[in-house]
Amino acid sequence: MPLLLPPPSPSIASNKLKLSTLTFVTSNADKIREVTSICKDYGITVNIRSIDLPELQGSIEEVAREKCRQAALAVNGPVLIEDSAVIFNALNGLPGPYIKWFYHSLGLSGLNRILAGHEDKSAAAVCTFAFSWGPRPDQEDSDSNSNNDTSS
């Protein structure tokens, strides 16, 4: 599934706009360690905020963009969010960005039961990062990376 991106925003490392601090909205300790480590290499200080952002319905990209917009409004400055999704091919892409709710409701064994009657049990994990320079609607950019194919 291709990701359609808006026109590129100015590079974080460009000479015109140098980002020195950003807020990463998450409560996931592993995500915090990873993003903090990467940003440190570029001289970017990361502030962490755990904000309960609304879980909206839509495509993976739409959900990430809206979460980023909401986070930018909450912090009133540069913000980064990450949203995870799992796509089961047998389920036509479900649960997608709703994996958190599927997992909390069904558990791992419940997810396995859903796939039990399907021959194709392949899946892909999709991590979507969305960045915004601030609360203006034209300040977002997002990108997805699905490098965790879990075909069985």
Image (cartoon, rainbow, N blue to C red):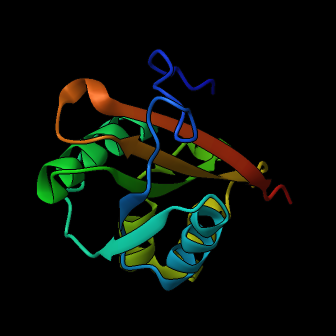
Query: Looking at this view, is 50 or 151 the one in front?
Result: 50
User: In the rendered image, which quarter contains the C terminus?
Assistant: bottom right
Which residue corresponds to the image point at 18% horizontal and 59% vertical from the top-left?
75
Which residue corresponds to the image point at 35% horizontal and 75% vertical from the top-left?
48
Q: Position of residue 89 (x, y in %)?
A: 67, 43
Query: Looking at this view, is 129 or 75 the one in front?
Result: 75
Taking the image as shown, residue 18 lies to the left or right of residue 152, namely: left
Query: Looking at this view, is 33 or 47 the one in front?
Result: 47
Taking the image as shown, residue 103 lies to the left or right of residue 72, namely: right
Locate residue 130: give its quadrant: top left
Residue 113 visible at all: no
Taking the image as shown, residue 147 lies to the left or right of residue 129, namely: right
Locate residue 20: give its quadrant: bottom left
Q: Residue furthest top?
A: 7
Q: Position of residue 118 (x, y in %)?
A: 70, 52
Q: Is residue 27 above or below residue 3?
A: below
Q: Is residue 127 above or below residue 33?
A: above
Total labels drawn: 0
Q: Position of residue 17 (x, y in %)?
A: 44, 35
